[in-house]
Amino acid sequence: MDSTNISLLSGTTLHSPTTAYKIVRTLGQGTFGITYLAEVNVDGALSALGATVYVTVKEFFMSKINGRKGTAVTNSDDGGYFEYYKKRFIKEAQNLKTLNHPNIVKVAETFESNGTAYYVMEYIDGETLSSVINRKGRIHEQQAINLTLQVTNALAYMHNKKMLHLDIKPSNIMISNGKAVLIDFGLSKQYTESGEPESSTSIGLGTPGYAPLEQANYHEHNGLPATLDIYALGATMMKMLTGISEMPPASEILNDGFPTSLFHKSGVSALLTDIVEKAMAPLKKNRYQTVEELCSDLAKLSHSTENTQIEQKSKNVEQKDINNKPNGIKYKYFTGMACLIGEWLFSFIMLCFSRDCDPDDDGFKLLTAFLIAAIFVFVWIMKRRHILPTDLLKKMRWGVTALVVGNALLLPMWNGSLTFSYFALSILFAPVSALLMMIRKD
């Protein structure tokens, strides 16, 4: 079923017992839910400032049995699966509300409406670790260690709270300004103080390539099986460090051995390779038994003398980049300044070859109108750049740049003349194009 037909429309308002959430756009959809970006108007003293808070709203929606009629969720299930999994969805939200850690997404509230359930989380302005890996090809060693240490801290906190995540993978880790945040706890499970599962439901299968062999048939009730999350975290490290397109399933590692050669080809140090290999040991008794043990080994490696050499080597690789393309804020500033200088140069060349460059009143009126419009557009983009899709922002950047260059070239190409107003427009409008190029969307 096409997500464009089943997602709530932009502008739809969801009402919880305490708050109204206005849908901005759909962020993603999975087997058991649809995630939206929504805005909340702030009440009280801040309302006079027109302050708006952005949140993430997750809707329980089973793609195979649910549909939509208006805003209401319809249900074609006669076996009770929808109600069963909806209760698990609500329980997930209730469990998440008890967690308070900087590397775990925060849940504000849960409520039922439109025939289904919702929970509201903080909006993380960033991208998934999976997206970062796809964009870069792979992540250099020191950065991979730093991100993994953040995730291990989050998992240690969860495990101390007797909770497993059970679906650690790059697409369930958000990266925002170098900070890693765990999201999507759809398979998470709570354990009692004695190590017994809180319900009789089985542990979820996890994601192939990230789940150990025993996760599919885990029936033991002899304590919190932290080794399940540890294996998945080791696989996440493998994906970061090697960038391989398809993760080997646990059965393949059991039969063929750990793929050390992949790490060697990627220039990963032997010490870090050994850590990943231990985290992904097919037999759980050979793995790290707690995330604290894994964290300790990573921390030692991060602060060792050898790691200083590793980091320098990784920086050299990062500098070249996988595709030999400049990236980051330096590239954006370079592009912006290149646009500014190039557009000014175009305008001055056209001025030199023009036959008519006297100021004219009508032209100044047009110039003023264009500049006012440009200011409004630029302010609007700056205020909303964090919710604009990256592709749309990119089109805006190059669209404005093309408009400026075209303005400088248009009249001279037609009749060899350039009025003063068009020349001034090119000169003054060019910085808007340059500033758009410098907007960060990282």
Image (spheres, rainbow, N blue to C red):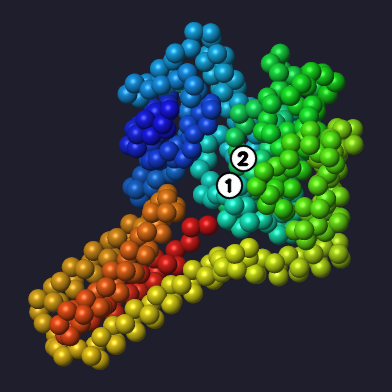
For image coordinates 35% across by 60% down, the residue present is: 396
Residue 147 visible in the shown view: no
Distance (Cα) linking label 2 and label 1: 7 Å
User: Which residue is the extreme one toward the top?
Assistant: 78
For image coordinates 58% across by 47% down, the residue present is: 128
Residue 16 visible in the shown view: yes
Quarter location, residue 405: bottom left
Residue flagged by tag 1: what amino acid is it? Thr
Front residue of 115 and 312: 312
Q: Which residue is mark 1?
A: 128
Front residue of 180 and 420: 420
Quarter location, residue 183: top right
Asked if residue 223 lies left or right of residue 113, the reply is right
Asked if residue 118 lies left or right of residue 184, the reply is left
Q: Position of residue 80 (x, y in %)?
A: 53, 9
Q: Is residue 238 above or below residue 26?
A: below
Circle 2 Cα neighbour tier, 10 Å, few/some/many (<14 / 14–19 / ≥20): some
Asked if residue 100 lies left or right of residue 192, the reply is left
Residue flagged by tag 2: what amino acid is it? Asn
Q: Looking at the rendered structure, which numbered label has been put on residue 172? A: 2
Q: Position of residue 235 (x, y in %)?
A: 74, 42
For image coordinates 29% across by 60% down, the residue present is: 377
Query: Is disc 1 placed on a helix, strand or loop?
Result: strand
Q: Is residue 162 above or below residue 394?
A: above
For the N terminus, the quadrant is top left
Q: Position of residue 20 (x, y in %)?
A: 38, 32
